[in-house]
Amino acid sequence: MLSKVIAVGSKVELRAAARSGRDEMEQPIYHSMVYDILSEDTLELTMPMERSKLVLLPVDGEYDIVFYGETGLYQCYARIVDRYKSDNVFILVAELISDLSKYQRREYFRFSCAMDIFFIVLQEDEIRVVETGLPYTPEPEAVMKRGIIVDISGGGLRYVSEQRCEPGSYIFCCFDLLRGDKTKKYELVGKVLSVRELEDKRGASEHRIQYYNLDVTTREEIIKFIFEEERKNRKKEKLM
């Protein structure tokens, strides 16, 4: 089944399989691509990179892998059995340890980007309003802080800003997404799951956000935007 739905060049997400009761969603996601398919249960992946540095995933490490195939997303568990350098490309050899299956949780596919985001941190009384399900609108005098979205999914986003927010806090944010030949503004509330200071950019922090009470329509629009942009990128890559 592997070679029927996955092709060389397919984008890949790797997340370390949860151990010792740790929530798998807390594990970082690494981005890679299929370099070669050796058999129906073994394939070569490019070594993931993070901030222009190779991430040396350990041999014998087990990962939850999501493949971005031509007909959708597919998921399985795999073990890294080897790693080496071939033609100046750093390679991981992954051996599937579970069946490949259609992946329905599309919202966790992250699309790398660079887009403006404007946000404010919600106060306790504002959070209580949001928790009731009532629509929230910031006060006219509220000063929005600026950041840059570095990746986005149907479940959340990551952004970088010099304005640090604390983990566990809630933000109201807005950003524009291209829909066809027009842009649409999205305003939503998110919970800050984690914050990490950037070593290569003093004073800036990376925030991981999970959408809070996001309606189905908006989530599907974000997912559709991601798939459309990925499709455009694939077409550009084929032309190069």
Image (tube, grey):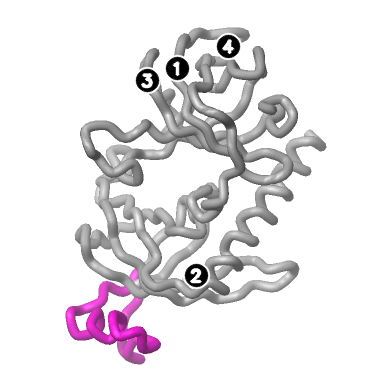
Spot occupied by residue 34 in the image (x, y as percentages of width and height): 62, 26
- The amino acid at mark 3 is Gly
Q: Secondary structure at mark 1?
A: strand
Mark 1 Cα shell of 10 Å, populated few (<14), some (14-19), many (≥20): many
Is residue 139 on the magenta stretch?
yes
Marks 3 and 4, the one that precedes in the sequence: 3
Q: Could you tell me the amino acid type at mark 2?
A: Phe
User: Which residues are drawn in magenta?
Assistant: 120-145
User: Disc 3 vs disc 4: which is toward the camera?
Assistant: 3
Mark 2 vs mark 3: in front:
3
**Residue appearing at x 48%, y 50% in the figure:** 108
Residue hosting label 2:
175
Q: Position of residue 171 (x, y in %)?
A: 31, 71
Name the residue tied to disc 1: 80
**Disc with the residue nearer the chain's start (2 vs 3):** 3
In this figure, which residue is indicated by the disc labeled 4? Answer: 88
Q: Mark 2 and mark 3 in contact? Answer it, CB < 8 Å.
A: no
Q: Residues within 10 Å of mark 3 (few under 14, many from 20)?
A: few
As measured in the structure, the alpha-carbon distance from the residue carrying label 1 to the one carrying label 2 is 38 Å
- Most extreme residue toward the left is 124
The tag earlier along the polypeptide, 4 or 2, is: 4
N-terminal label among 4 and 1: 1
User: Secondary structure beneath disc 4?
Assistant: loop
Residues at marks 4 and 1, CA–CA distance in whole angstroms: 20 Å
Query: Would residue 203 be found to the left or right of residue 16 on screen?
Result: left
Mark 3 or mark 1: whose residue is earlier in sequence: 3
213 in relation to 240, above or below: below
Give the residue drawn at x 53%, y 8%: 85
Q: Quadrant of residue 155?
A: bottom left
